Image (tube, rainbow, N blue to C red):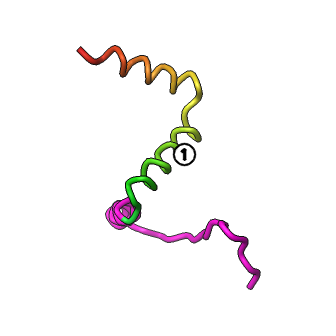
Amino acid sequence: MPQQRPGAIERKVQLLTPEEADAADRAYWAGLTPDERVAKLCELRELWMTEDERRLKRTLVMFEVE
């Protein structure tokens, strides 16, 4: 078996029912520290949102406060 590099991602595939997948997701996120959760959220935000979408979100949030 080849040696993994430090920091390498372990990849595995599981076949789960929707209920099992939800439970696995909850267990994963519950196992993270608050700082790790925020870091993951920022990482997902950077991956899936364009700069224009991020800017628009900030603008909308600023103007929703009344």
Q: Which of 22 and 27 is in front in this view?
A: 27
**Residue at image location 74% in from the left, 80% down from the top:** 3
Q: In which quarter of the image is residue 20?
A: bottom left
| 11 in relation to 58, above or below | below
Residue located 51% across and 39% down the image: 45
Q: Say if the magenta span includes residue 66.
A: no
* x then y, percent, for residue 23: 33, 65
Look at the picture and state if 44 lies above or below 51: below
x, y (%) of residue 62? 36, 18
Residue beneath the point at 44% across and 48% down:
38
Few, some or many C-alpha atoms within 10 Å of disc 1 (few <14, some 14-19, many ≥20)?
Answer: few
Q: Left or right: 16 with respect to 64?
A: right
Name the one closer to the observer, 56 or 6: 6
Specify the segment rendered in magenta.
Answer: 1-30
Quadrant of res 66: top left
Q: How many marks?
A: 1
Q: Does the magenta stretch include residue 11?
A: yes
Location of residue 64 in the rendering, given as x and y in whole percent from the top left corner: 30, 17
**Residue 17 in the figure: left or right of residue 66:** right
Q: Residue furthest left?
A: 66
Taking 20 as reference, is 59 above or below it?
above
The image quadrant where one finds the N terminus is: bottom right
Residue, disc 1: 43
> Considering only vertical position in the picture, is 35 above or below 31?
above
Is 12 on the left-hand or right-hand side of 29? right
Q: Residue furthest bottom?
A: 1
The residue furthest front is 35
The amino acid on which the numbered mark 1 sits, given as a three-letter code, is: Glu
Which residue is found at the position 46% from the left and 45% from the top?
A: 41
**Secondary structure at numbered mark 1:** helix
